[in-house]
Amino acid sequence: MSETATVPLTATRIGGSFVADVTDIDVARNLDTAWDAIHAAYLEHKILAFHGQQLTAKQFHDFGERFGVIEPHTVAMYHHEEFPGITVLSNRVEMGRPKGIRDAGSHWHSDYSYKEIPANVTMLYALEIPNGGGDTMFTDLAAAYKAFPEAMKRRLDGLKALHHYRHTKDRDHPEGRWRLLSEVEQEATPEVVHPVVRTHPETGEKSIFAFPGITSGIQHILGMNLAESKELLAEIYAHCTDRRFRFTHKWQVGDLLLWDNRCTMHHATTDILPADQFRTIYRINTRGTRPV
Ligand code: SIN
């Protein structure tokens, strides 16, 4: 456990190499005075958890705007009706229509990695949480990169990979997300190329930027045959999801969790939530910079 003595904010490390609990902050009231400390803690800990917050959609949106340009989700039907920059995640069905995305990614991924300019921050604000389950898992991809042997780092540095939103085109996957895309949305999600190792634009730290996600994820590494690429990716994923780099967030109503997509990946567990357990969360993503 380490304490970050940034007044007026206390950030206490709760994961091994990343993640801090933030106390003494009411985001709706202290945002102006605490902003510099929040931003510094976010860069230091990669994931921040605030508890017991009571935010309106507007206050959550205002918080999101501090981190950059808010980028609405690719699938418009899940946008909040007043603030399209907020995506609603929910397994509730109201008037025969899904209230939100039932499963925003029960696989390892980093938000918007399928875009030329992926997200820097994701923030989630919990409105309704089941009695059990619905946790979100994370891995620290900077720590994972650092722990690779030097020979592996040399092998990975300079490699590039092809990412695509409809990566597996799996019609039977419960998300079925690709089927919901309009032609315009499909055109807005072409294949993109990113480095397998990226350097964080604010901290200078290197991390892995490779994801096995279902609807977003890597198709293959460029310049390798498919079998060789598959084998290397499997090795990267096995290393990055090792227990020593992991953290699991167990949700409570009023939690505000934010993370840095440039050096972490995450995995929802909503695909296994029982049908009588409800979870409703607001999400915001902000636009980052081109990975280099
Ligand atoms: C996400 O993958 O962006 C959301 C994670 C969650 O719902 O737990």
Image (cartoon, grey):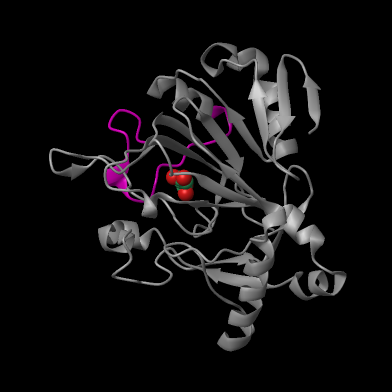
Q: Taking 122 as reference, is 10 left or right?
A: right
Question: Which residues, given as a range, are shown in magenta?
Answer: 65-84
For the N terminus, the quadrant is top right
Q: Measuring from the top left, give residue 47's x and y in whole percent.
A: 64, 38
Residue 225 seen from this side: no
Q: Which residue lies furthest to the right in this view?
A: 150
Q: Residue furthest left?
A: 95
For the C terminus, the quadrant is bottom right
Q: Measuring from the top left, give residue 148's x and y in whole percent.
A: 79, 66
| Residue at 65% over, 56% down | 291
| Residue at 27% over, 63% down | 179
Q: Is 224 located above or below residue 86 in the figure? A: below
Q: Is 157 located above or below residue 130 in the figure? A: below
Q: Measuring from the top left, give residue 96's x and y in whole percent.
A: 13, 43
* Residue 243 figure quarter: bottom right
Q: Name the dominant secondary structure of the magenta segment.
A: loop
* Residue 271 figure quarter: bottom left
Q: Does the magenta stretch include residue 33?
A: no
Query: Which of 170/193 is in front?
Result: 170
| Residue at 79% over, 27% down | 3
Residue 27 seen from this side: yes
Q: Does the magenta stretch include residue 69?
A: yes
Query: Which of 143/284 is in front?
Result: 143
Q: Measuring from the top left, give residue 168's x and y in whole percent.
A: 41, 72
| Residue at 61% over, 16% down | 25
Q: Taking 289 as reference, is 12 left or right?
A: right
Query: Which of 180/131 is in front?
Result: 131
